[in-house]
Image (cartoon, rainbow, N blue to C red):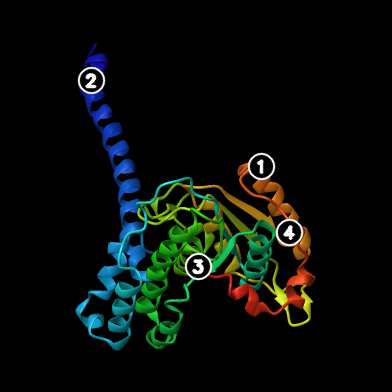
Amino acid sequence: MELLQGFRITRPIWIALVDFVLYIHFFAKTTHASISIERSADYGVFYSFDGVMEVFNDPKYFNTTAVQHLMKTYQETYPYDPRRRYGRRKPFIVVESTRRDSRRSVGWMLARSTGSRYMSNPPRSLVPLRELFDEYGGLLRRAFFSISMYAAAHDVLEVMYRYPVVMSGYWHDQAAFAIAKEYPDIEDLPPPGDPIYRWPADLLKPDLVFFINAPDRGQEGWKATPRPNYFKPKLVEVMRRMHGMPILEINDTYLYDEMLQRVQVHLDRYLTGKLNFERVLYKDIVSNNRDRDRDREY
């Protein structure tokens, strides 16, 4: 009886301990998520336009020549919100890659084969300012590329009610690189589902993202036995954890013509009937003057 009485006395304490452990677990998980989001701006991952502007409005940056030129150019080029449009919008497709040449080549070919407008990031309006921010580097440079995404989104909205749009490099490009660079090992990355992998709520979403996982490449072509690359696996893993929209990974072990065919198969599945395809070969694009392709940018 004494033992049972003792059990009755200690049982509420046991329940309290369980509740305390569960609370600590939930609090730690929630705190980790909030910390990862709060710290993300320090290494250049932004989740709102206002968050980017906080950097430019910082007293130590606001009066710099680069920021003053940027603010003037942005306000003159993008004086209004183009979201208030009517009609049915066309598809907006983004091509990302671990290699810029793969991303650009597949993006060019996809735009040509679907009659889409090809756009890049930063947009033309802000490209002349890039060198100014390259000189500063660090957070200010990353903020420049982030505001460039909002400018690029503005350009997409201007044309996507008339033409489909293909863009090479968008938010995932900057965010995945910064996150992978910030954490030393894959094991240190925030877990899947962490808010750090979510898309900014106020940034135009693409309908579909293609992520080209390209192998390492040497001066004489693809490497059969490349040297260890400890950064790329982290970058790939970060891209795989991004959520909020379809991201289709394509292993770049194919010729560009074959990659384009694989992309078209996915488009026919995810955007059925929304795009028309024409036969385009990589050699045809290379043989033409690439300035003609750049003229397709808005």
Q: CA distance from mark 3 to mark 2?
A: 58 Å
Out of 208 and 78, give the one closest to the viewer: 78
Answer with mark 3 or mark 2, whichever residue precedes in sequence: 2
Out of 132 and 268, give the one closest to the viewer: 268
The picture places residue 126, in percent across and down from the top left corner, at 42, 77
Answer with mark 3 or mark 1, whichever residue precedes in sequence: 3
Task: Decide: is 273 above or below 108.
Answer: above
Q: CA distance from mark 3 to mark 1?
A: 29 Å
Disc sitting over residue 269 in the figure: 1
Badge 3: residue crowd in 10 Å (few <14, some 14–19, many ≥20): many
Q: CA distance from mark 3 to mark 4?
A: 23 Å
Q: Are marks 1 and 2 in contact (CB under 8 Å)?
A: no
The picture places residue 109, in percent across and down from the top left corner, at 69, 64
Which of discs 1 and 2 lies nearer the camera? The answer is 1
Which of discs 3 and 2 lies nearer the camera? The answer is 3
Residue at image coords 44%, 58%: 157
Badge 2: residue crowd in 10 Å (few <14, some 14–19, many ≥20): few
Answer with mark 3 or mark 4, whichever residue precedes in sequence: 3
Q: Quadrant of residue 3?
A: top left
For badge 4, the amino acid type reads Met
Name the residue carrying label 3: 177
- Quadrant occupied by the N terminus: top left
Name the residue carrying label 4: 259
142 relative position to 55: left or right = right
Which of discs 1 and 4 lies nearer the camera? The answer is 1
For badge 2, the amino acid type reads Gly
288 relative position to 62: left or right = right
